[in-house]
Image (cartoon, grey):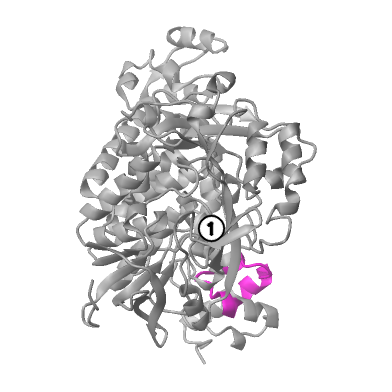
Amino acid sequence: MKNVDFDDLYDIIVVGAGHAGIEASLAGAHMGCTVLLLTGNLDTIGYMSCNPAIGGLAKGHLVREIDALGGQMAKTTDFAGMHFRRLNTNKGPAVRGNRAQCDRVMYRTGMKTVIEQQEGIDLKQATVTGLITEGKAIKGVETSLGLSFFGKTVVLTTGTFLNGLIHIGLTHFPAGRAGEPPSIGISDSLRQLGFTIGRLKTGTTPRLDAKTIDFSALEPQYSDNPPIPFSFSTEKITNPLIACYMTYTNEQAHAFILSGLDRSPLYSGIIKGVGARYCPSIEDKVVKFKDKSRHQIFLEPEGYNTKEVYPNGLATSLPYDIQLKMLRAIKGLEEVEIMRPGYAIEYDFVEPTQIYPTLETKHVNGLYHAGQINGTSGYEEAGAQGLVAGINAALRVRKEQPLIITRQQAYIGVLIDDLVTKGTQEPYRMFTSRAEHRLVLREDNADIRLCDIGRSIGLLSKKDYALFLQRRDQRNEVLARLQSSRVKGERAREVLRQTGYADLSDTTTLYQLLKRPNITIKHLESLEPSLVHADRAIKDAIEVEVKYDGYIKREIEFIHRLSRLEDTKIPEGFFYNTIPGLSTEIKEKLGRFKPVTLGQASRISGITPAAIAILDVYIRRYRTGYSASTK
């Protein structure tokens, strides 16, 4: 490597090659930018630090949306997936989600191959220690070797590496994750630039030796077969499918856990960072849910060619000896050996209300934050942010309008709006309950919602967009056939009898028949043979839309009513202090949060409907010549 002359400028420098960094760098390169991707270790690109699984409830929505925009996560998941399950199938379509267990090595090497082969990306191993700025503008980064790299924009995707500190019992040591050094210097650089830094905590489970597990005593959980791919462009999954296994903690295991609390960094006050309430450690579960005599554990193989097993549900930072005693008290694990101990890790994050919905920071122009640096947890949340940061860095370089994905458009919009508007005091995790319009924002229609956007900014490939157009045309054809095909009572009698309905007294369309709760599109194939040849995923999506047609229309009408607030942009540099009728507290919050739209302003805690009405009036006056301008 060499010192880079100031004139030798990259369009985008991405710091960190985890899930956020991968999506950011690929987005920038696909959109025609020169990208420098810096990582402390070239061998851990795309490494799955915790569970080697992608998706789940709400997280699966994010993966599908990343794919619809032109991102990589779904494709690599399909490439490396070993076990696929659709969750919540017994519940409504808005809260169903796909999840895949991956071969950890295949996922990592698959991502590295994609990065290495992507034209426009320079990949270098280097540890970034600081930022180079000029005034309020980013200019580049400094590394531990004294090298400087210069770029028009910089995307920080630092994961848990910012001043990372690992805890196992009362032992603690600096690390970004097990076996890798932390990132030192970036936090200080950010503080000097005026950013507020906080401290969070997350954790992982011990890894177990499969040779020492009695799987015959455990309940297998088999993969869906055939599995549903994550990527809209994947025709089918061809990997061999493996089983996971279920077991449970018990009162004896809980007793061992409680006996070790005096040496727990979590309960002895050593850990200062705030942990995720929705993904607690096993010691947290036992202490806080004393009425529960057991907790479910999923034993998930980490790959085809390894004996390591991930016990999902057993994250812990207890001392090694307590971890082993706890495990050996569990059915099937009586003789288990630990290959890697579980641990907790504390790390720095930057309060996310200091970034715009584009993920560009408010303190430094051209600097973007994505992933755990914004206070989130999870691969999917990181990938979604990395994609948006990379897109907007590229659009800034191209001197084009930024892309803001709203909470009415996608779960990605919900995630980012929550972060930049409300902030977070604990690791943020995506849930379906966070989305007000989740019946409209389903996994199955992510392509309908976002593929046109992905193509318009130059990210979604021509090939993938052509596949989308084919799916959309077929969808429209199937819908048209359902709406136009009419059946008489006698012809529909068998289907009605099977599903518990009386004979029809008049003719009706297949569309109207499908609205009935017990009738599926599969039943209608006998009445309209052309339906047999339509894609299964398309038919499933249409069935949801038809059965929930009234609810969906109501949601869309509600979204349209809200759209005026979301479409009302607050002019850049709008000076709130000159507006009469706003309290000092509201003026201070608006000035600090710098909302981009009236809709975003309305979601800031403490901003009243009356304040929004006053703002609306003065924004209109501003546009007609009144100056609530910069002063």
Whether residue 89 is situated above or below residue 267 in the rendered picture: above
Q: Nearer the viewer, residue 402 or 530?
A: 402
How crowded pointer 1 is (Cα within 10 Å; few <14, some 14-19, many 20+) is rated as: many
User: Label 1's element?
Assistant: loop
Residue type at tag 1: Thr
Residue drawn at 38 percent across, 12 percent down: 526
Q: Is residue 345 positioned above or below 442 on the image?
A: below
Which residue is disc 1 drawn over? 376
**What segment carries the magenta color?**
590-614
Is-magenta flag for residue 592?
Answer: yes
Q: Residue at x 53, y 28 (%)?
A: 212
Where residue 368 sits, quadrant-wise, is bottom left
Q: Tell me which residue sits at (58%, 27%) in the image.
A: 246
Left or right of 5? Residue 386 is right
Residue 407 visible to an observer of this rendering:
no
Q: Is residue 528 left or right of residue 248?
A: left
